Amino acid sequence: MHIVRPVQISDIQNIYQLYKKIGEHPGGIIRVSSEITLDYIQDFVHKSISDGLILAIPHPEHEHQIIAEIHAYRIPISAFRHILTDLTIVVNPEFQGQGLGKLLFTSFLNKIKKSYPHILRVELFVREKNTNTVQFYKKLGFISEAKHYQKIKNLDHSIETPIHMAWFNPKYNNNLTHQDLNRKANHNS
């Protein structure tokens, strides 16, 4: 049985190893292997821990090895403070097809519904030709908002179109103030 848990700073090296493995498979994520650096991992882990959400699934027999991870974070622009963006999910190729992506996504969205009433939108991009993934996201409640025609240029020089998708938090509370959020955070600590 797999467990989903919050990521900690001490997981950075293990997440880096997971992303390096993912980077070996074209089309797994938007970045190519050479762009998956420790700085890149540290950046999104710190952003997601401090102002977003990041969850992982450890290996069932080796708890320090991360086999799947999902994250999104807020960007520091006040007008977008109700949005978690740049959602990324990765699953170790050796563990794909076992429902880990669905487990991570449902845990992630349930956590937002339960503990993030100040977040209205969660945003992601998916390659248009990846129709199975588009359908998967739609089943989770994401809607297609726009196509970014010919935005992705692959290493083989082919051009792809990503779809921008968003999920809306049914538990969103537009009336929360920063004081309310601080009180809630202190209460949950």
Image (cartoon, grey):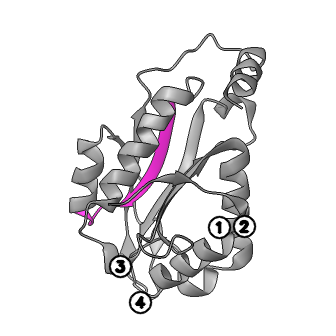
| Residue that lies at the very extreme toward the front in this rendered image | 61
Residue at x-position 44% and y-position 71%? 59
Residue type for callout 2:
Gln
Q: Position of residue 186 (x, y in %)?
A: 75, 25
Q: Residue at x 45, y 20 (%)?
A: 171
> Which residue occupies the foreground of this view, 90 or 155?
90
- Which label was assigned to residue 42? 2
Q: The disc labelled 1 sits on which kind of residue?
A: Asp
Marks 3 and 4, how far apart at CA: 22 Å
Mark 3 vs 4, N-terminal side: 3
Q: Residues within 10 Å of mark 3 (few under 14, many from 20)?
A: some
Kind of residue sitting beneath label 4: Asp
Q: Is residue 135 above or below residue 130?
A: above
Q: Nearer the viewer, mark 3 or mark 4?
A: 3
Find disc 1 in the rendering and name its residue. Answer: 11
| Dominant secondary structure of the residues highlighted in magenta in the image | strand
What is the x, y in percent for residue 99? 26, 60
Mark before the other along the chain sequence, 4 or 2: 2
Image disc number at residue 93? 3
Q: CA distance from mark 3 to mark 1?
A: 19 Å
Chain-order first, disc 1 or disc 4 = 1
Q: Position of residue 74 (x, y in %)?
A: 65, 42
Does label 3 or label 2 sit earlier along the sequence? Answer: 2
Identify the residue position indicated by label 4 in the image.
Answer: 156
Q: Which residues are magenta?
A: 121-131
Circle 3 SS class = helix
| Disc with the residue nearer the chain's start (3 vs 1) | 1
